[in-house]
Amino acid sequence: MTALAFAPWLAVATPFAVTVLAAVLGRFLGRGVAWLAMLAPLSLLAVGVSLLTSPRTGHAVTVPWLLQGTTRVTVGVLGDGLAALMLVVVGVVALMVMLFSVGYMAGDDGYTRYFALLALFTTAMSGLVLSADLVVLLGAWELVGACSYLLIGFWYRRPSAAAAALKAFLVTHVGDAGMLLGIALLWSRTRDVSLDGLRSAAASLPPGVTTAIALLLLLGAIGKSAQFPLHFWLPDAMEGPTPVSALIHAATMVAAGVFLVARLQPLFQASPTASGVVLAVGAFTALMAATIAVAQSDIKKVLAYSTISQLGFMFAALGAGAWQAAMFHLVTHAAFKALLFLGAGSVIHGTGTQELSEMGGLARKMPVTAVTWLVGALALAGIPPLAGFWSKDAVIASVLRGSPLAGVALLLASMLTAFYITRATRLAFFGAYRGGGHPHEGGWVMAVPLGVLALGAVFLGAAGKPIEHLLLGTPEPIETGVAAIAVVLALVGAGLAWRRYASGPVGDELAGGRVWDALKSGYAFDAAVMRAVVAPVLALAGVSYERADRDAIDAAAEGVGRGARGLGALLARLQSGDAQWYGALIGAGVVLLAAAALWAGR
Amino acid sequence: MSASPITLLCTVLFGLGVYGTLARRDLVAVLACVEVMLGAASVQLVAFAHAAKVIGSGQAFALVLLVLAAAEACVGLGLVLATVKRAGTQRVDELTEVRG
């Protein structure tokens, strides 16, 4: 295994080869393409584990790429602890999601396309976490975004799916534009975009420039990780198949923003302003998204806002400088949120609906899903001794030390977390069945991933110390005071929700009113963006079409055409078609020429 | 080269031919006017040959021209016939198919 550690690029090359093979041979393999595609996450897993178990240098293996005089850009792979951790997370979740998809996507027309895209996604994600410089990282970053676009719009005949894919792509690219500018600014100052060079650059550049670079790169992370104010694409991204939501829009891609900030930690440590922004954005997003999640009636929307909220927790920890805690929470969150999403997928598969109001009582009809979901829900709520408790405590404790206000916001958010996940659990799995279908389990291919991820959600709490050690940090002792408060708040939130929704979704009807509507619509953020951004852009497009394109450019082009036709019509009068008139003109011409010749030859 | 009476005659004949070719509206008349021009040229050839005291070549040319004119009249009349059949008219000013 250790031999693999010296060739981390295999974790990119293998999935890519698998992608190509799956795409080319897919039509011959039929349903077997899924098992071929699973080689992709397996290769990530193999390389990740081998990196974890072998001594790491933390140095990048690079090759020169662009040579221009004395400046050059190198590309390479950096197989350090952070990358190894991400590889394992991505590998495990992707493998489980693919296995689950064998059941979930069975009978779908785009089976081959689906698995080829998932394999491509693992390729891109592997490139993203292994890249040793910002140029390759940005390339992989965009490829991940492209896969996200293609998978959100997987059912492209559904207009809402196509629109959601477009929205996700456009909104994340607002952030990506900032990221590109940040890389350009760094390049213009240091002529070095490698992650190794970043450390010295952060120390040598003027503080203002460092802050500017950090904030621009942060913009990319905010877009990818769906943080305020670029958070509103993620709920729409639920239009994609549910396993895709589990893999891309819960566990891995949206966590790439957290990974990026963790990667750029030297930069953010050098700039207190940028760190403060990260902290503020994270804490605000965590609380805001948690309040919205309370009012969602679609089980996937609940989980989507929950994901935004949990990513906010991670950002807050990053802003407080506790990036190891953020990565710890990323790992546990990947396990229990992927579990919850796959559980939701199993429910949707079994009942044919996403509306919580049409579920209920599923615990008796889908026991495996119910038990694993419950494990995920408890982990998310932060109930000890499940994984979420340990990582959330590490996050909240570190944030409280940095900024009490943000810490309190996170505590409130974690209470709301317990509330909304208990609400969803109660509405979906307890009480009486309110739907009209025949709920059923999806077979072993859907049960096994749920079981594996549930094990992760239970035991990953013990991974805190190893992760801190792996990421070269000092393990934080558990803060019993904070932990106790958090657990009490979580129990209070869960208890409130349990009582309120004891008799089905009546609680929602009781709550009706303006506040509830505001929560349900996500504070009408979409409408605000429509008014503030989309409408002006469309108006500008309309004006430039009418004034510039139609009235100036088109008019000029058509004017030239009309002028030529007019001139032509004028000249065409000479061509009367009367042969005798031509003859007369020729004769006159001959006489004139003869006269001229005579006159010249005098 | 002074203008002898015969040259004058030929010039007038040729001018009449040109005028008729350009001004007459009937195809057959136009053809006849072309023949008039040819005739003027033939007469001029013979006249020049006579004035230059060269026997043979001018007259021979005139004879060749005569045959040529006969052939040309044949082809021309054939064309006139075809045109009348196709266009239904022999008026030149009505044959304006190539107008732009």
Image: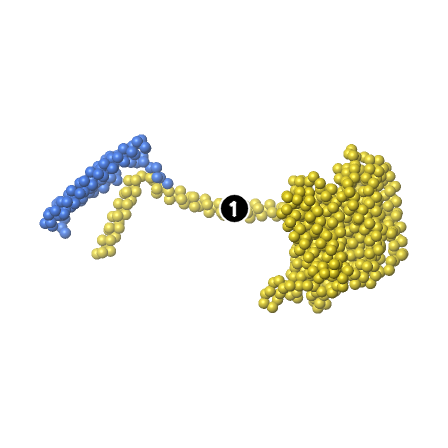
Point out residue A440 in the picture as x, y percentages from the top left corner.
79, 37
The answer to which of A338 and A11 lies nearer the viewer is: A11
In the displayed structure image, the side of residue A577 where residue A452 appears, left or right: right
Q: Is residue A394 visible?
A: yes
Classify the position of the N terminus of chain A by image quarter. bottom right
Residue at point 16%, 45% (across, down) = B61
Q: Quadrant of residue A360?
A: top right
Up-down: is A340 above or below A8?
above
Q: Which residue is mark 1?
A: A554
Q: Mark 1 falls on what kind of element? A: helix
Pinpoint the chain carrying mark 1.
A
Q: Quadrant of residue B41?
A: top left
Classify the position of the C terminus of chain A by image quarter. bottom left
Point out residue A216 in the picture as x, y percentages from the top left corner.
69, 58
Q: What's the residue type where badge 1 is placed?
A: Asp
Point out residue A68 in the picture as x, y percentages from the top left corner.
59, 65
The answer to which of A427 and B3 lies nearer the viewer is: A427
Residue at point 25%, 37% (across, down) = B76
Chain B colour? blue
The answer to which of A207 and A393 lies nearer the viewer is: A393
In the displayed structure image, the side of residue A432 where residue A14 appears, left or right: left
User: Which chain has been coloured yellow in this picture?
Assistant: A
Q: Is residue A322 visible?
A: no
Up-down: is A532 above or below A107?
below
Crowd class of label 1 (few under 14; some 14 to 19; many from 20; radius 10 Å): some
Point out residue A577 in the picture as x, y percentages from the top left corner.
33, 39
In the displayed structure image, the side of residue A478 where residue B45 appears, left or right: left
In the displayed structure image, the side of residue B23 where residue A394 appears, left or right: right
Residue at point 73%, 64% (across, down) = A58
The answer to which of A304 and A508 lies nearer the viewer is: A304
